[in-house]
Amino acid sequence: MSSPTALSAEDPLIDLGAYVTGLDRWLAERPECLREVALPAPSFADRVAAMSRLMETLYAAGWSKYGWPEGVGGLGGSILHRAALWDALARHGVPGMALFEHLEVLGPTLVALGPRPFVAQALPKFLGGRERWAQAFSEPGAGSDLANVRTRAVAVDDDYVITGRKIWTSWARYARWALLLARTGTPEARHRGLTAFVLDLHDPGVEVTPIEQANGTDELAEVALDDARVPGDRIVGDVNGGWHVAMHILSHERGTYPWFRHCFLYGQLRDGLERARPEHDQALGNALLDLAATTAASRAALRAQAAGSLLGPRAAFTKLLLCEAERATSDWVLANDADLAIGVQEDDVAVHRQEYLFSRIVTIYGGSQQMQLNTIAKQVLGLP
Amino acid sequence: MTTIIDGHPSEFVAVAERALGNGNASTALASLGWWQLLRDLDDDESRRALFSVFRAQGRALVNSTALAALLAVPYLDDADLELGTVAAAATRTSPRRGTVHVAVGELVGMRLLVDRPGRGASVMNADRVRLQRIDLPGRLDLHEVHLDESRWRPMIPEDTAARARRQSLALGRVAVALEMLGAAEGALELAAEHARGREQFGQPIGTFQAVQHLLAWAMTDCAAIEAAADAAVASGAALPPRFDEIVKALAGRNARRACERTLQALGAIGFTAEHSHHHFHSRVLALDSLLGTSADLTHALGRWLREEPGDPQLPTALLFPATPDELLVGKEVLKR
């Protein structure tokens, strides 16, 4: 099948079945596109570089344009197209998203609430792997208590001048842009005094310091802001409406993102079958149950999103189920491969070891597991 | 007369629960138009309404003929039997007595279908079998079926029965999963109510995070069953490979876990015969033992993945049940 970019307005690939079929065939006919990204690469920078090249290829061929609206670099369709794209990549041996997770975490919010002229020129570069994004929410004093953000943004002429410190800023070292939450109101206004900005991480006044993590990668960073300037037309949502933007993002990060992540957990399971031992069949079965629960719950979230609704507090379920699936899968992988505990000589062992350790932080990022449980207890179960 | 309305699965469940809560289960099934729904299993909306009755049965701790009647459906055409007149026994595996046939629910006026893997299936009047009542909490009517070996004549030969058996198991497993979900939800409602009202240290225990998290996990266990069972019902005949087993295993594991968590939140009062919690818990345990336990199914699924490694088809198959066959070309498609 040829690449879909040249198709007419009556695009048959808007039909999901045709899209999946066409994409599968296209990928099967071009193993060379996937070769580099499928190689085990312990260096995260190498993984980002390889994935960026694959994104460029997929964008040029048109496949990654589906699911995004026309006018911001897309070809129409719904989030189900994107769900199918990443599922297909995982089935064809791509091991993970290597920071393009943010397409699914930040992308929908940029499209829904971002300044349209900016998003129209920035999103195609993101989709095409040429520019990458970070999320700058957390601060040393604002982790689970996100409403406690203290980084300040002060209006000066047509700009905002931003001062403060962000931490755990995911993928900042590799990114050009960050979606940043800063205080435009008083500290007492709590969540009502926050605004979301698009910050250029290459601007003077912005200093990014990568944080080396316990699993050996450097996906997180600290970002110091010293009179960094953001033009007033790079506000996402409304001034003092940052909480709404954050909740929009978290609805995706908790509700639909688990679909994208869990496709690669099926991949880890499949790779682990080479070393599978019968004595761990029960653990393997349990991992399958947790994966299937994530499939089913995130399927419901995707369909709700495709129909135009956000999940609200029930997104917490999908996130918790993903955590369980991640843990069960990596426990089973470790049970069959004791080399992960010690050896890092071979690249594939080193990468699997990183994955195993990473599975232990899934319960921390994107709102800790305990915060998800609080949400369910209070907002769904109605406990006092 | 209650009418099943169009809408979200939870609306179906609420309607069914109200009807079943009014007393007589046979009257409730009739008033819900349930037997007509059984004729329309291929229709998406009918199927959703039909299966919601099982979740409602679990929540209301009600007995009916529904499961036995559903299990019988795939055999009806082969034996020229009329829908609504035949109840099929479920099977369980006993470490002491091997395969045991269990009749679930009300059987008044029904003929009993017994399927014996390897030996075909037969339909018999109540006088041809001995039914031994099993007394256990859970307000679930269970009878062990004792066959007269000398009088066994398969009415449906093994090769025909085997095909019906697969369909019957798939339908039954999803139905039982939903009933376990309902029972776990019933236990959770008791525990949540307790947590809101019971005071210790001068405040409701539901204000303590330890208790909140126990119950939030119990609800997450339930949310997983709901999502998986709803996906199975929505898929209908296009069920992904072994998805009925996945749903049944997940439901058994999670519903048991939810009952354990809710018991912990209830404290000692939940472990008394006087409190209703044990009825929900016992119903879950009994249902988990039918049509493959969660422990056995989970192990079998693990072995299946290990022995027949193919590309994982589940995400795609569940999200796009109508995906053309071309998708599967060149891959090892796992057989149902």
Image: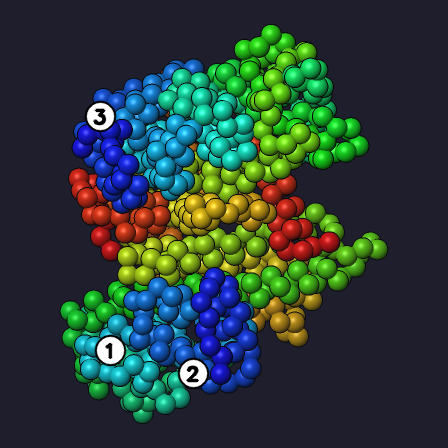
Query: Horizontal and vertical percent for residue A19?
Result: 27, 39
Determine the residue positioned at 39% across, 74% down.
Answer: B67
Q: Residues within 10 Å of mark 2 (few under 14, many from 20)?
A: some
CB within 8 Å, label 1 to label 3: no
- Of B159 and B229, nearer the camera is B229
Residue B301 visible in the current orientation:
yes
Which residue has dot 3 on it? A31
Q: Residue B94, located in which quarter of the rendered image? A: bottom left
Mark 3 vs mark 2: in front: 2
Considering the numbered disc 2 on the image, is that residue within a helix, a strand or a loop? helix
Of all chains, the one bearing label 1 is B
Classify residue B213 as left or right of residue B55: right
The amino acid type, in three-letter code, at marker 2 is: Ala
Q: Earlier in the sequence, mark 1 or mark 2?
A: 2
Number of numbered labels in the structure image: 3
Q: Residue furthest bottom?
A: B127
**Marker disc for residue B91:** none
Of all chains, the one bearing label 3 is A
**Cα–Cα span, label 1 and label 3:** 50 Å
- Of A87 and A216, nearer the camera is A87
Q: Residues within 10 Å of mark 3 (few under 14, many from 20)?
A: few
Determine the residue positioned at 65% across, 34% down.
Answer: A241
Same chain for marks 1 and 3?
Answer: no
Same chain for marks 1 and 2?
Answer: yes
Which residue has dot 2 on it? B30
